[in-house]
Image (tube, rainbow, N blue to C red):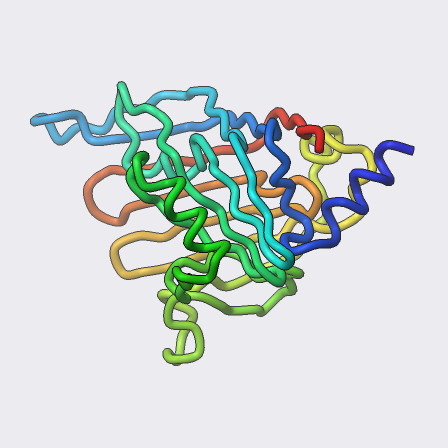
Protein backbone atom coordinates (compact mmCIF):
# COMPACT_ATOMS: atom_id res chain seq x y z
CA UNK A 1 0.00 0.00 0.00
CA UNK A 2 2.90 2.38 0.73
CA UNK A 3 3.99 2.84 -2.94
CA UNK A 4 0.46 3.92 -3.85
CA UNK A 5 0.37 6.44 -0.99
CA UNK A 6 3.76 7.87 -2.02
CA UNK A 7 2.62 8.10 -5.65
CA UNK A 8 -0.48 10.04 -4.64
CA UNK A 9 1.54 12.43 -2.50
CA UNK A 10 3.98 13.22 -5.31
CA UNK A 11 1.40 13.54 -8.09
CA UNK A 12 -0.73 16.21 -6.44
CA UNK A 13 -0.28 19.44 -4.52
CA UNK A 14 1.76 22.49 -5.51
CA UNK A 15 4.73 20.46 -6.81
CA UNK A 16 3.35 17.33 -8.53
CA UNK A 17 6.01 14.76 -9.35
CA UNK A 18 8.91 16.37 -7.44
CA UNK A 19 9.33 14.94 -3.91
CA UNK A 20 10.29 17.71 -1.47
CA UNK A 21 9.71 16.02 1.88
CA UNK A 22 12.54 16.78 4.34
CA UNK A 23 14.95 13.86 4.43
CA UNK A 24 14.52 13.04 0.73
CA UNK A 25 17.88 12.56 -0.98
CA UNK A 26 19.24 11.77 -4.43
CA UNK A 27 22.69 10.26 -4.99
CA UNK A 28 24.39 10.69 -8.36
CA UNK A 29 27.43 9.22 -10.08
CA UNK A 30 29.03 12.24 -11.71
CA UNK A 31 31.77 12.45 -14.32
CA UNK A 32 33.32 15.94 -14.15
CA UNK A 33 36.04 17.71 -16.13
CA UNK A 34 37.74 21.03 -15.46
CA UNK A 35 40.70 23.09 -16.64
CA UNK A 36 43.73 22.66 -14.40
CA UNK A 37 44.93 26.00 -13.04
CA UNK A 38 47.59 27.59 -15.19
CA UNK A 39 48.11 24.63 -17.52
CA UNK A 40 45.02 24.74 -19.70
CA UNK A 41 44.94 20.94 -19.63
CA UNK A 42 41.68 19.24 -18.74
CA UNK A 43 41.41 17.00 -15.70
CA UNK A 44 38.73 14.40 -15.06
CA UNK A 45 37.20 12.71 -12.04
CA UNK A 46 34.26 10.45 -11.21
CA UNK A 47 32.61 11.22 -7.91
CA UNK A 48 29.52 10.55 -5.81
CA UNK A 49 27.24 13.56 -5.26
CA UNK A 50 24.26 13.78 -2.90
CA UNK A 51 21.39 16.25 -3.07
CA UNK A 52 19.24 16.51 0.06
CA UNK A 53 16.04 18.26 1.16
CA UNK A 54 16.92 19.86 4.50
CA UNK A 55 13.62 21.61 5.21
CA UNK A 56 10.32 22.47 3.55
CA UNK A 57 7.63 25.01 4.39
CA UNK A 58 4.21 25.18 2.77
CA UNK A 59 1.40 27.64 2.30
CA UNK A 60 -2.07 26.89 0.96
CA UNK A 61 -0.85 26.60 -2.64
CA UNK A 62 2.96 26.54 -2.63
CA UNK A 63 6.01 24.94 -1.05
CA UNK A 64 9.53 26.27 -0.53
CA UNK A 65 12.29 23.76 0.21
CA UNK A 66 15.86 24.30 1.34
CA UNK A 67 18.15 22.02 -0.65
CA UNK A 68 21.78 21.10 -0.09
CA UNK A 69 23.84 20.15 -3.13
CA UNK A 70 21.41 20.80 -5.98
CA UNK A 71 23.09 19.26 -9.09
CA UNK A 72 23.92 22.68 -10.59
CA UNK A 73 26.77 22.76 -8.04
CA UNK A 74 28.53 20.33 -10.40
CA UNK A 75 28.84 22.95 -13.18
CA UNK A 76 32.34 24.45 -13.10
CA UNK A 77 33.27 21.83 -10.51
CA UNK A 78 36.84 21.70 -9.24
CA UNK A 79 38.53 19.83 -6.37
CA UNK A 80 37.50 21.04 -2.95
CA UNK A 81 34.09 22.39 -3.99
CA UNK A 82 31.49 21.93 -1.28
CA UNK A 83 27.70 21.58 -1.68
CA UNK A 84 25.84 24.87 -1.43
CA UNK A 85 22.33 25.72 -0.26
CA UNK A 86 19.56 26.40 -2.78
CA UNK A 87 15.84 27.09 -2.54
CA UNK A 88 13.26 25.28 -4.67
CA UNK A 89 9.90 27.06 -4.81
CA UNK A 90 6.86 25.34 -6.33
CA UNK A 91 3.45 26.84 -7.01
CA UNK A 92 0.75 25.41 -9.31
CA UNK A 93 3.23 22.97 -10.84
CA UNK A 94 5.82 25.64 -11.66
CA UNK A 95 9.23 24.96 -10.15
CA UNK A 96 11.72 27.77 -9.53
CA UNK A 97 15.36 27.52 -8.46
CA UNK A 98 17.23 30.13 -6.41
CA UNK A 99 20.87 30.27 -5.27
CA UNK A 100 20.87 32.80 -2.40
CA UNK A 101 23.75 33.32 0.03
CA UNK A 102 23.47 30.84 2.90
CA UNK A 103 22.58 33.58 5.37
CA UNK A 104 19.66 34.72 3.17
CA UNK A 105 17.94 31.34 2.69
CA UNK A 106 15.44 31.62 5.55
CA UNK A 107 14.42 35.15 4.60
CA UNK A 108 13.95 34.14 0.95
CA UNK A 109 11.73 31.19 1.89
CA UNK A 110 9.58 33.46 4.05
CA UNK A 111 9.32 36.10 1.32
CA UNK A 112 8.38 33.58 -1.37
CA UNK A 113 5.63 32.00 0.72
CA UNK A 114 4.31 35.43 1.75
CA UNK A 115 4.30 36.63 -1.87
CA UNK A 116 6.55 39.61 -1.16
CA UNK A 117 9.19 38.10 -3.49
CA UNK A 118 7.93 36.99 -6.89
CA UNK A 119 9.89 34.48 -9.02
CA UNK A 120 10.62 35.38 -12.64
CA UNK A 121 10.85 33.41 -15.88
CA UNK A 122 14.63 33.31 -15.42
CA UNK A 123 14.15 31.33 -12.19
CA UNK A 124 11.80 28.75 -13.76
CA UNK A 125 13.29 25.28 -14.31
CA UNK A 126 10.20 23.04 -14.63
CA UNK A 127 6.56 23.43 -15.61
CA UNK A 128 4.70 20.32 -14.53
CA UNK A 129 3.31 18.20 -16.04
CA UNK A 130 5.86 18.06 -18.85
CA UNK A 131 5.17 17.23 -22.49
CA UNK A 132 7.37 16.99 -25.58
CA UNK A 133 7.84 20.26 -27.45
CA UNK A 134 7.09 22.38 -24.40
CA UNK A 135 9.17 25.56 -23.95
CA UNK A 136 9.25 27.75 -20.87
CA UNK A 137 11.41 30.05 -18.76
CA UNK A 138 14.06 32.51 -19.90
CA UNK A 139 13.19 33.94 -23.31
CA UNK A 140 10.62 31.31 -24.29
CA UNK A 141 8.30 32.68 -26.96
CA UNK A 142 10.49 35.69 -27.69
CA UNK A 143 12.96 33.96 -30.06
CA UNK A 144 12.56 32.05 -33.34
CA UNK A 145 14.64 29.16 -31.92
CA UNK A 146 14.69 27.23 -28.64
CA UNK A 147 17.79 28.96 -27.21
CA UNK A 148 17.77 30.73 -23.84
CA UNK A 149 14.76 28.77 -22.58
CA UNK A 150 14.01 25.28 -21.34
CA UNK A 151 12.86 22.98 -24.13
CA UNK A 152 11.42 19.49 -23.58
CA UNK A 153 13.12 17.47 -26.31
CA UNK A 154 11.77 13.99 -25.66
CA UNK A 155 9.82 11.60 -23.45
CA UNK A 156 11.38 8.15 -23.37
CA UNK A 157 10.84 4.83 -21.64
CA UNK A 158 12.36 4.58 -18.19
CA UNK A 159 15.81 2.97 -18.12
CA UNK A 160 16.12 -0.03 -15.83
CA UNK A 161 18.63 1.86 -13.65
CA UNK A 162 15.90 4.38 -12.75
CA UNK A 163 12.95 1.98 -12.59
CA UNK A 164 14.66 -0.13 -9.93
CA UNK A 165 14.78 2.88 -7.60
CA UNK A 166 10.97 2.99 -7.39
CA UNK A 167 9.03 0.04 -8.68
CA UNK A 168 5.73 1.96 -8.89
CA UNK A 169 6.93 4.43 -11.55
CA UNK A 170 4.67 4.54 -14.62
CA UNK A 171 5.62 7.79 -16.42
CA UNK A 172 8.49 8.66 -18.79
CA UNK A 173 12.00 10.04 -18.67
CA UNK A 174 11.69 13.61 -19.94
CA UNK A 175 14.79 15.27 -21.41
CA UNK A 176 14.98 19.06 -21.13
CA UNK A 177 17.71 21.24 -22.63
CA UNK A 178 18.66 24.86 -21.98
CA UNK A 179 20.94 26.09 -24.75
CA UNK A 180 22.91 29.33 -24.90
CA UNK A 181 25.76 30.38 -27.15
CA UNK A 182 28.48 29.68 -24.54
CA UNK A 183 27.04 26.53 -22.93
CA UNK A 184 24.16 24.10 -22.56
CA UNK A 185 22.46 22.23 -19.72
CA UNK A 186 20.50 18.96 -19.87
CA UNK A 187 18.01 17.74 -17.26
CA UNK A 188 16.47 14.29 -17.15
CA UNK A 189 13.27 14.36 -15.12
CA UNK A 190 11.08 11.46 -13.99
CA UNK A 191 7.78 12.32 -12.24
CA UNK A 192 7.76 10.79 -8.78
CA UNK A 193 11.55 10.82 -8.43
CA UNK A 194 12.76 14.17 -9.77
CA UNK A 195 16.07 14.91 -11.47
CA UNK A 196 17.64 11.65 -12.64
CA UNK A 197 20.25 13.25 -14.90
CA UNK A 198 22.11 16.55 -14.84
CA UNK A 199 24.62 17.47 -17.54
CA UNK A 200 26.47 20.73 -18.15
CA UNK A 201 28.90 21.61 -20.94
CA UNK A 202 30.76 24.85 -21.57
CA UNK A 203 31.72 25.44 -25.19
CA UNK A 204 35.00 27.18 -24.40
CA UNK A 205 37.11 26.65 -21.26
CA UNK A 206 36.71 23.07 -20.09
CA UNK A 207 33.82 22.72 -17.65
CA UNK A 208 31.85 19.48 -18.01
CA UNK A 209 29.57 17.46 -15.77
CA UNK A 210 27.37 14.45 -16.46
CA UNK A 211 25.57 12.98 -13.45
CA UNK A 212 23.11 10.07 -13.36
CA UNK A 213 20.96 9.08 -10.40
CA UNK A 214 22.12 5.87 -8.72
CA UNK A 215 20.37 6.13 -5.34
CA UNK A 216 17.12 7.61 -4.06
CA UNK A 217 15.65 7.90 -0.57
CA UNK A 218 12.15 9.23 0.10
CA UNK A 219 11.75 11.29 3.26
CA UNK A 220 8.80 10.72 5.54
CA UNK A 221 6.07 13.38 6.01
In the image, residue 41 above or below residue 186? above
Q: Residue at the location (36% across, 65% down)?
A: 148
Q: Percent position (x, y) of residue 219?
A: 67, 29
In the image, residue 87 above or below residue 42? below
Q: Residue at the location (43% across, 20% down)?
A: 47
**Number of numbered tags placed on the structure image:** 0
Q: Percent position (x, y) of residue 117?
A: 39, 60
Q: Quadrant of residue 14?
A: bottom right
In the image, taking residue 2 as reference, residue 61 lies left or right, namely left
Residue farthest along the left direction in this orientation: 38
Q: Residue at the location (46% across, 24% down)?
A: 49
Q: Residue at the location (68% across, 30% down)?
A: 218
Instruction: Name the foreground residue: 123 vs 47.
Output: 123
Instruction: Name the foreground residue: 68 vs 57.
Output: 57
Q: Quadrant of residue 87?
A: top left
In the image, residue 208 above or below residue 58? above
Instruction: Name the foreground residue: 34 vs 18.
Output: 18
Amino acid sequence: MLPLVVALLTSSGPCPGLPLTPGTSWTYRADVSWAANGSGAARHETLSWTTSVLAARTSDSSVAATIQGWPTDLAWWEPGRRPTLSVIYCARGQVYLFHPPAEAVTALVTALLAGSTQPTADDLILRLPLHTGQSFGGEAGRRPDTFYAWFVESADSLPASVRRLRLDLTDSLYTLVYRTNPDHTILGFVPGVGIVRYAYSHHGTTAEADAWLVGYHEGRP
